[in-house]
Amino acid sequence: MLRRQAAKQYGIEIPSQVPMTLVVEHLLAKKDRLAANTWRQYRAALSYAIEQELSITPDTVELEELQAAHRQLARESGYGTNKKGNSTSSNKLKSIKQNDFDIISDYLRSQIGNHQYALALLTWMQAGEATGLRPSEWESAQIIDLDGHTALKIENAKHTNGRGNGSHRHLILDALEPEKVNAIKDMIFMLDGFSREMSFKSFYDGVRSYNYSAVRTALGKRSKYPTLYTYRHQFTANCKASNLSRKEVAALLGQASDATAPLHYGRKQQGRKGATKVKPLAREVETVREKHNQFNIAEYKKVSGIKK
């Protein structure tokens, strides 16, 4: 992504021909507009990309340019980033405390019968935290029998561009609490019912719009509020807190690589140990690409702000 942006900025038609020194300059130029955590993620990703090119480049001149780019990037700390960030994503929670989840749930229960989407949002919250689905993936999700197991079949939202782990993934629900299984069933049943009145997009937009006002009413004044995507982040944090492997987490999220969740999704410290009861299919775990083992671990910890 950064290379494509740099290509556009410098008028270079083919992104792969942009020297890494220019990509680094492009990133540094936008540093003051990035939140500190976003900066660390970009920096780690770019550092990794440079290291990959260093390992396969035979040309001496290009090798020197790559080494210079890597040194320049390594010298940059988080100083100078935007503390709050300019992106709307900086106002969105990537985790939700159990107490806040309960407060919102209680408020929504009090609104059932008063608002069209109160029960829908409550169901979405419960099913979303239990499964980690992207909001758009609920449109085609279905419960099936899979070799004697109760499973949720999901069409991976990003499989067409190589970022998904196959066209579909399956979550085994056998060990999930009955009330959470019921929430998933209710979600699918609810979507089927609403589909007779409106498109999935209209339904999704309605629930998302109601979430905006409902969480603010329930929680009061805050700097950040949960969105429908927050529950995917919390699911991921719960997976990490439950000590699932990177490949298992990636398979549950439908990601092609095990390097995505550690950088971009909920943190282990924000998870609830034992809260994740769904299991991935073994064959889908095996197809996840292992990318994290190629990282320079010391550099990864340094740029990611990990002290231990």
Image (tube, grey):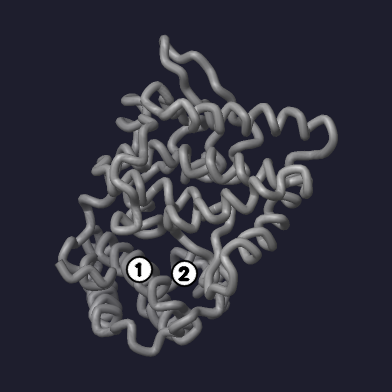
Residue 282 in the image, given as x and y percentages of width and height: 32, 25
The crowd level at tag 1 (other Cα within 10 Å; few <14, some 14-19, many 20+) is many
Corner quadrant of residue 182:
top right
Q: Residue 174 in the image: state x and y as whole percent.
A: 40, 21
**Picture residue at 46% right of the left edge, 68% below the top:** 3
Whether residues under marks 1 and 2 lie with C-beta atoms below 8 angstroms apart, the answer is yes
| Three-letter code for the amino acid on which mark 2 is drawn | Leu
Inspect this view and state whether residue 229 appears.
Answer: yes
- Front residue of this view, candidates 54 and 140: 140
Q: Which of the 4 image quadrants contains residue 306? A: bottom left
Task: From the viewer's perspective, tell me whether residue 193 is left or right of residue 263.
Answer: right
Which image quarter holds the C terminus? bottom left
Q: Mark 2 points at which residue?
A: 2
Write down the quadrant of residue 43 in the picture: bottom left
Side of 104 relative to 305 (left or right): right
Among numbered discs 1 and 2, the one appearing first in the sequence: 2
**Residue position marked by numbered label 1 in the rendering:** 46
**Where does the image place residue 17, in percent across and percent down from the top left?**
44, 68
Which amino acid does the dot numbered 1 rest on?
Leu
The residue lying toward the viewer, choosing from 307 and 160, is: 307
Residue at 43% x, 53% y: name it: 98
Q: Can residue 61 be seen in this view?
A: no
Viewer-nearest residue: 289 or 276: 276
281 relative position to 141: left or right: left
Compared with 230, 20 (above or below) is below
Q: What element carries label 1?
A: helix
The residue that appears at 47% across and 30% down in the rendered structure is 169
Q: Is mark 2 on a helix, strand or loop?
A: helix
Please provide percent x and percent y for residue 264. 40, 58
The one of 171 and 186 positioned closer to us in this rendering:
186
Residue 189, compared with residue 117, is above or below; it is above
